[in-house]
Image: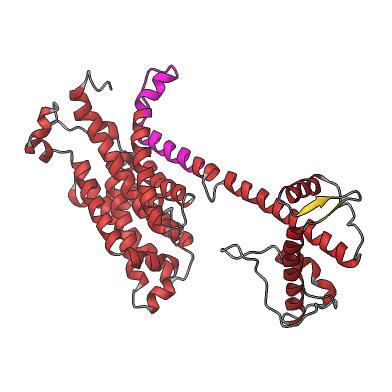
Amino acid sequence: MILAQMPSLLLSVDVPAVLAAVLSACVCALLGNFLLLRKMAMLGDAISHAILPGIVISFLLLGTRSTPAMLAGAAAAGVLTAVIVEVVRRLGRVEAGAAIGVVFSAMFALGVVLMERAARNVDLDADCVLYGALESIRWGAATSWASLGSAETWLAMPRQVTTLLVLGLVSAAAVVVFFKHLRLACFDSAMADALGFPSWIIHTGLTVLVAAATVASFEAVGSILVVSMLVCPPAAARHLTDRLSRQVVLSVIIAGVCAVSGYVLAIVGPEWVGFGHSLQAAGMIAVMGGVVLLACIVCGPRHGLIARRIRQRQLARTVAREDLLGALWRIEEGRAGEPAARPPVGAAGRSARREAIRAGEIESTVGGVRLTALGRERAREIIRAHRQWETYLVDELGHRPDHVHRTAEALEHVRTPGGERLAPDQPRSRDPHDREIP
């Protein structure tokens, strides 16, 4: 829609749809962070299947297929599903994914049976709850920019937006107030119980909020968007930071960006590629969530594939250079006064040699290369760590002296988070092979 030419349609159609999409995506992303930590990210998908008996029972009790009645039954079934999942997980001592699978399949089967036996002659269409329709949300009172100054206009906000706004405020308040408890219960339930924070109450409250958010979002955006927003923004944020508080904030921002960009692309995207019809907005928002997640998986600054590949290559070069320094130390140690032999050829050896020369650790000679004063000091640290690890493996762990070289060769490169070389402090001055520990 062209903003300048169609302000009435923009306010009455696009604005409420975008608000509903943003609110739904942000609420789901906010709660999805803690589901992701608990390995229950598919709880939203389970609830989307398990609400069927609630819809059928609501029709049987109330005799109407109105949207509020359907949503009331769906909400009751969703909350009941969340509670039963938590009970089965704790009392049955089964993994969270298994508990979700058992409960949602049983609830869905019950719904199918009820629909077949009790309502076979009635056209019960659950699409209004399962798939949603962002494009059908209308804000009739917003007819112009001037109308936004009226309180009646805001009081006439579509019910879907109002519901999601209230639920978003409740969820945000719950996360802020109980953030410490949620973090502790998600990372270590046993410690939470020991400290007097019953983890089962925290988990049950979280799952009830997820059930409420899932059901509230169905009418507007549908189950596909709910499931994707419960998973994609938190998973994407997880690749961007190691702090939970930052992850929560980033996931909400990502969800909002996906909602807005997905809605816009659903409208204008087909025109860019030559198609005449707009796409389903909720589906495009879910696609954007997947695109952002894929981008974070590949390009994340710390846990992305590219960053990990760069760190692996840097580590490989560091190990190769340190192995070269260690080899030259051993050669000089065994051939005092003789020039060091040329190191083994090969791509890794040539690269390590060039880097060591640039770092001033070795210098070229007529017969090959040899350690400089700086290189000899660094090689001394490497050899010391290697022989300390060999001594530790033999004296403390009982390994045979002829079986510890390869392990110590790997451990000699380990460093602390502060960058210091990690090695056990051994009182002996000679290693198990009777070589001096420098």
Q: Looking at the picture, how far across and down is residue 289, in whole percent? A: 43, 40
Callout count: 0
Please tell me in which quadrant of the rendered image residue 80 appears: bottom left
Q: Looking at the picture, how far across and down is residue 303, in whole percent? A: 54, 51
Question: Measured along the vertical axis of the image, is residue 78 above or below residue 428?
Answer: above
Image point (44%, 46%), residue name: 232
Residue 272 falls inside the magenta stretch: yes
Looking at the image, which is closer to me, 200 or 345? 345
Image point (80%, 51%), residue name: 363
Looking at the image, which is closer to me, 403 or 203? 403
Q: Quadrant of the C terminus?
A: bottom right
Residue 90 falls inside the magenta stretch: no
Residue 125 seen in this snapshot: no
Image point (76%, 60%), residue name: 373
Q: Looking at the picture, how far across and down is residue 187, in whole percent? A: 44, 66
User: Looking at the image, what colour scheme do you see?
Assistant: secondary structure
> Is the stretch drawn in magenta largely helix, strand or loop?
helix
Instruction: Report the magenta residues as a range.
Output: 265-294
Q: Looking at the picture, how far across and down is residue 109, in whole percent? A: 40, 53
The answer to whether residue 174 is left or right of residue 366 is left
Looking at the image, which is closer to me, 73 or 432? 432
Please tell me in which quadrant of the rendered image residue 336 appears: bottom right
Question: Measured along the vertical axis of the image, is residue 211 above or below residue 20?
Answer: below
Question: Measured along the vertical axis of the image, is residue 320 above or below residue 155?
Answer: below
Q: Quadrant of the N terminus?
A: top left
The answer to whether residue 73 is left or right of residue 276 is left
Image point (80%, 44%), residue name: 347
Please tell me in which quadrant of the rendered image residue 76 appears: bottom left
The answer to whether residue 371 is left or right of residue 291 is right
Residue 349 seen in this snapshot: yes
